Each structure stands twice: as C-alpha cells, then as structure tokens.
Image (cartoon, rainbow, N blue to C red):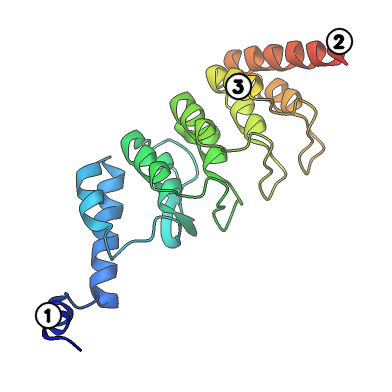
Amino acid sequence: MPYRARRLQSSAPPPPTPEEKLKKLNIAMRAVMNDDMRTVVSCIPGHIEVGKVYDMALNVSDTSQAPRRQVKASLLHLAVYHKAYHCSKLFLHLGAPVEARESELGDTALHCAARIGGHPFVQLLMEYGASPTSFNAAKDTPLHLAAERGRVHSVAALLAKGAPTDAKNRYQETPWDVAFLAGSPSSLVCADLILTEHMQRREKK
C-alpha cells in the first residue's frame, strides 16, 4: 500500500462505540422534544439512522397529564408527537420513511399528526408523500383520528388529498361516524365536511 494511502487510512477516526451512539441518540431525542434542530443535526453523522425505529416513550394525547407509552418508533414520530416542526422537516428532508409505524398503535407519522400534531404537520407529511389512506392497528385512517378530535383544518387537508370518506375501522365506523359520535362543536363541523365531500364524490361517479 502506498505511503500516502496508509497515512490517510490511519488518520480516519475510529467508528463510534455503541455507548457513544446511545449517548448521541439520547441527546438528539431531548433536542427533538425542544425542536432544537441544530443539536439534532450535530448528533446524526455516524451515530443516528434517520430511518430506524428506536425504543422511546410517547404520549397518547397532547395533554401534559397523558400517560406515556414505551414503544418502538422513529424519530419522525417523536418530532410529530412533540410538535417539533423544524425537526420533522429535517427528518423528512433526510429521507425518513413516512409510512414507518410505531409498535403499539400501528400509527404512521400522519396518524400521529392527525391525533396530536395538527394541520401544519398533516400538510407537511403529505407534501413528502404520506398516504391519507393508511390504516393503523385499529383500522383507523388519519381522517378518523382528525375527525374524532375535531381538527377541522386537518380534516379539510386530508379530504383534499383524497382521504377515503367511507373507510371503516375495526368498530365498523366511518370517519363521519366517529366525528358525529364525538359530539363536540368542532367534530360536528368535521362531520359536515366529510358528508359534503362524500356526496360530491358520489355525484361525480
């Protein structure tokens, strides 16, 4: 081997140890929770795989008293759950798979956005190819989750991207059913949007 090649090879930094990778991952996760994109970027090279699922704790709703669940999920899930918009966009730009699912509820990142994250995240994920027709473990589509919670803007965005109005979850409920049964003023607005869209699609057939 030529001297120059040997010298370049010997100067290469050693690969990070598992302990170093875990330390960087924990730093990155804390940074994601604060939408600290610069810190996350500094942790990625050689330590974090954006498309991988990791063990982490996620809330089941957007209230601070919500119980936390230990699941396997992607950093994109974590960013959406913590409403970390800049980190979500970073992971998507770096190729995070939008259809990856967390291990308990079977939610994609778009389900998470419909459940917790809100309209900006729903819009962002669909811009990067997230499917509004995906089902989670309960056979809910993102539209089911957004409609039940009365997220009017998210429902409108999902409908505009072709979210099915007649999809049924494991309880045989359509998005209109869950919105109507929820009964809040905003969920009833969602029910009206869904019914109107459903009727318009039928007329076009």
Look at the picture and state if 159 lies above or below 73.
Answer: above
Q: Nearer the viewer, mark 1 or mark 3?
A: 1
Mark 2 or 1 closer to N-term?
1
- The percent coordinates of residue 170 (x first, y second) are 78, 44
Q: Amino acid at mark 2?
A: Glu
Q: Is residue 188 toward the left or the right of residue 169 in the image?
A: left
Q: Nearer the viewer, mark 2 or mark 1?
A: 1
Mark 3–mark 2 Cα distance, whole angstroms, equals 21 Å
Look at the picture and state if 38 lies above or below 62.
Answer: below
- The percent coordinates of residue 13 (x first, y second) are 16, 75
Q: Secondary structure at mark 1?
A: helix
Q: Amino acid at mark 3?
A: Val
Disc 1 target residue: 4
Mark 1 or 3 closer to N-term?
1
Near-viewer residue (148 or 92): 92
Disc 2 target residue: 203
Does residue 65 appear anywhere in the picture?
A: no
Question: Around disc 1, counting alpha carbons within 10 Å, would you say few (fewer than 14), some (14 to 19), or many (20 or more)?
Answer: few
Q: Is residue 183 toward the left or the right of residue 12 in the image?
A: right
Q: Amino acid at mark 1?
A: Arg
Residue at 69% across, 39% down: 140
Asked where in the image residue 159 lies, by quadrant, the reply is top right
Look at the picture and state if 17 lies above or below 76.
Answer: below
- The percent coordinates of residue 143 (x first, y second) are 65, 29
Asked where in the image residue 121 lies, by quadrant, the reply is top left
Q: Are marks 3 and 2 in contact (CB under 8 Å)?
A: no
Question: Around disc 3, counting alpha carbons within 10 Å, would you say few (fewer than 14), some (14 to 19), or many (20 or more)?
Answer: many
The image's mark for residue 155 is 3
